[in-house]
Amino acid sequence: MNTRTSALDALVFGVDVQSGDVRGDAPSYAVVAYDGENLDRDVVSFRKLRRLVEREEPALLATDNVYELATDRDDLVRFLRWLPGATRLVQVTGAERPEPLSRVASRHGVPYGKDPMQEAEAAARLAAANVGHEVTAFTDTTTVKVSRGRSTGSGGWSQDRYTRRIHGNVKARAREVEDLLDEENLEYERDVTEKYGGFSNAVFTVEAAPDDLPVSQSRSGDTRIEIERERRDGIEFEPLVKRRDRVLVGIDPGTTTAVAVVSLDGEVLDVYSTRTDDTAAVIEWLVERGRPIVVAADVEPMPETVEKFRRSFDADGWHPDSDLPVDEKLHRARDCTYDNDHERDALAAALFAFDDYADQFERITRKAPPQFDRGEIIDRVVTGEASVEAVVRDLSGDEESDDEETSHEPRELTPEERRIKRLERRADRLDEKVDELTDRLSEKDKRIAEYEEELSEARREERREARERREINRLERETDRLERERDEERERADRLEAKLERLKTLWKLDHSDFADVSEGRDLVPVKVIEQFTRDAIDAADEAYGLAAGDVVYLRDASGAGRSTAERLASTGPRVVLRDGNLSDAADQVLFDHDIPVAPADSVTIQEVDELAVARESEVEAAIADWAQRADEREQEQKSAMVDQIISEHRAESGD
């Protein structure tokens, strides 16, 4: 917020619509450039107005209604983002509820006319006098983003080196920005995204306006810098100058001087105590916090030191009929925060003074017209001992013309004549009040009509936005559905492509010519199963298919039970090569299904990725060896069975 109170020290542009409307095709604007002494006038198009502002960069761009420069809030935000950093947009007629420009100009003694050029001049002069509110949509926080200036792309054989170089350059540029911010002693937070070779981006959140940054938006080679000012939640109006509201002050003098400041609504604004500050320092502290209209003490009579403060501010004085008891001061200041007894006494004095003035403040507030500053009216009534009506007339520039006293009155007025004059004056005041109320009623009717039009426009805009939101939601849902279908198709394509690659590899294994077996093609494909489990068998079947007559290699044959062995036996393998020992149950199942089982080290297996090949001759030898062992095992089983039968028969005969 600007707190300058001196005369104009920069260029001000006043702007008003000359013809057309910003919502139309070609509005024109009356522009007045004012530097405190000279006035330059012109009528320009909206485009030329923007070029003029960009070239001259005035300190203030003043208007009676900012929506003469923008169609809606979003357009106003875009206009504020476009404004040069040194230029501020000012609405001289107030904040969200602006007053008529004629009334503001009259109140501040600025020439006014209904012609657009005269209104533009009035806006420029008012802004130059620090009248109005700055319109802002941005905070003093700025985001600086350092990111890649090029896409890393899909690339070729040198893609890794290309990507590493880009990320390295982003990291180096981010460090340069960080060093520049540190040199300017700016407060910031850094958030980086690390990628292969460096950073993909680095975001600096800086507590400063864009014009105060030592870097600018740019794009160079592998990196780019984007600068964006942080938006507020909405459009805000801030007074050009900081108001000093009227306040009540309680003072407790002594070796330690304590001061308390209370608003006209009884709110404690500030309190402090000092043993070292002199009277001038205390007065300066008070001036920074408001305009005292009542200075209070907690004892009777008012101490001379407090009286000096009262005279310094030309304020009304207050003191109790007798010294305030400690228990009453404690009770009155029970909800306040203070550090010592001196601050408590100052608070009690200010709060008891507010209690005495509260009814008067309320009566003045009820009588004061809303367009006038309540604090100023209370100040003039309390310190000047004037009536509310007289103060309002004085502020309106319509001072009541009292009858001048003359030294040549022929005679003293009779009681009836004095009463008639009093009634005439009262009638005049009432007529003025009626006129004032009529004007206020007309103004309110006009404002109501404007609000109704704005409400209708807002409702139309809301309906349009609702339709757009519904359509956007529908399109977003449709987009999400299509993206899901796309992702599913991509996954399916990836699975089919992987399966095709495996089949191609199998085909190559079935038809390959290895150097050591080029004659006779003594090769057979081997299908590898990682573990003797149902999941591993199913995974192998899914990957490259298990069929009757396959040579199967169990990389880990331990741990399988009957059901797992039955699952493998159902595929009808030609032979099972194993690493590790089979369980008895699994071995018996495979034996019962006449499936040969041989140690894997009895066959030379050459693995290629997930597939493998073995020499046909060695596989045949392993099968033959198993057949011989199977015959022996069968003979042993038969012999054992005969022995068991004989034993059982002997046991039965013995009985």
Image (tube, rainbow, N blue to C red):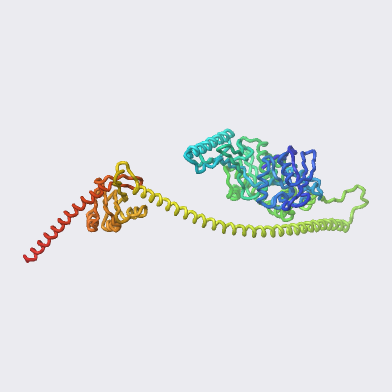
- The residue lying toward the viewer, choosing from 53 and 484, is 484
- The residue lying toward the viewer, choosing from 292 and 355, is 292
Task: Name the quadrant containing residue 279.
Answer: top right
Position of 494 with respect to 166 (left or right) is left
- Name the quadrant of the C terminus: bottom left
Position of 464 with respect to 439 (left or right) is left
Residue 566 shows up from this direction? yes
Vertical position of residue 553 compared to residue 165: above or below? below
- Residue 106 location, x and y as percent? 79, 48
- The residue lying toward the viewer, choosing from 483 and 208, is 483
- Residue 515 location, x and y as percent? 32, 41
Residue projecting furthest to the top: 183
- Residue 421 location, x and y as percent? 86, 56
- The residue lying toward the viewer, choosing from 168 and 255, is 168
- Name the quadrant of the N terminus: top right
Vertical position of residue 642 compared to residue 131: above or below? below
Question: Which residue is pictured at 92% across the width and 52% down the height?
Answer: 411
Residue 294 shows up from this direction? no
Residue projecting furthest to the left: 654
- Residue 230 location, x and y as percent? 60, 45
The mark tally for this picture is 0
Task: Name the quadrant containing residue 145.
Answer: top right
